[in-house]
Image (spheres, rainbow, N blue to C red):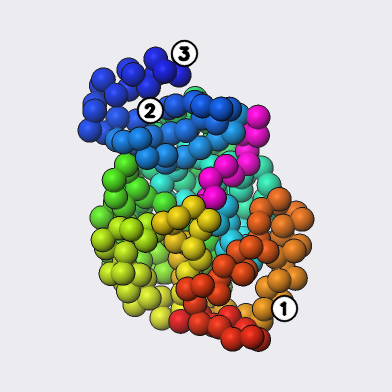
Amino acid sequence: MRFFALWRRARARDSAEAVYVKERFGVRSLHIGSDTVQSAMRIARPDELELAYTRSMMAFLLFNEAPRRVILVGLGGGSLAKFIYHRMPQATIEAVEINPRVVALAREQFHLPPDDARLAVRIGDGAQHLARPGPAADVIAVDGYDGHAQAETLATRPFYCACRLRLAPGGMLVVNLWSSDRGFAECLERLESAFPAGTLCLPARRPGNVIVFAFRDHPGALLWDDLRQRARTLQARYGIEFVSFVEALREMNRSDARALYVR
């Protein structure tokens, strides 16, 4: 009942941009402006990744097993931030979220830790933040949606170019896209244009989500045998379905029996 009251109060304040929480069957979910689930947390396992697309975003570990610095654009309930914070102690995380209500709920309802030497949450525009000079990142992960569409400023070629410039050698941009979005093809073309070293697409298990991995530098030969071995190791370490990710990479990318090819 407490969370129903929270949901009702938040929607009453601003029905167009309401940020509210629901809870059902042991899963707490965050909503922004619609009933579309933006983030979810299983209450019994608050630091695990409940949604399939967030687990798919972590497939960047197949190409960089130990990133030292991660920038997250779009916080949501803090699922990625929490997972990286608790499971990857070598990494520092900087999260940029434009909506202060989202940050407040992530802290109050979704167990996001307070800022410390490894975690910093900034309230601001992610596109503006990446356009400014700053420390290079090994991974930049972008998940910037409201209840209806991707934020326009996070889907432009200048934004993707700014991300590439902020990446360290060997760094990667990870972008969550909706394949049902009418601008999906154009967005993918912008990513490919901004990252000439190559991109890969991973369809998430949840229908409609496609995760794009864009490489600052060409990753070299991606042999299936190597990827499968890496996936088995990562799956045992993190409890995420990395072996399935490797097989799903065949669906939207060039490959043959020996290797996967970036485009």
Which residue in the structure is indicated by mark 3? 1
Q: In this figure, which residue is indicated by the disc labeled 2?
A: 20
Q: Earlier in the sequence, mark 1 or mark 3?
A: 3
Determine whether, in the image, residue 218 is placed left or right of residue 156.
right
* Among the two numbered marks 1 and 2 on one chain, the one whose residue lies closer to the N terminus: 2
Residue 120 rendering spot, x and y as whole percentages: 50, 42
> Along the line of sight, which residue is nearer the eye, 102 or 2?
2
What is the CA distance from the residue labelled 2 to the residue labelled 3? 14 Å
Asked whether the viewer can see residue 15, the reply is yes
* Residue drawn at point x = 32 percent, y = 22 percent: 10
Q: Which residue is mark 1?
A: 225
Mark 2 and mark 3 residues within 8 Å of each other at the beta carbon: no
Amino acid tagged 1: Asp
Asked which quadrant contains residue 111, the reply is: top right
Question: Which of these two is toward me, 3 or 91?
Answer: 3
Which residue is more in the foreground, 254 or 10? 254
Residue 236 vs 25, above or below: the answer is below
Where is residue 129? Give x, y as percent. 35, 53
Check disc 3: other Cα within 10 Å, few if <14, some if 14-19, many if 20+: few
Between the C-alphas of marks 1 and 3, the distance is 51 Å
* Magenta segment includes 48: yes
Chain part drawn in magenta:
44-54
The amino acid marked with disc number 2 is Tyr
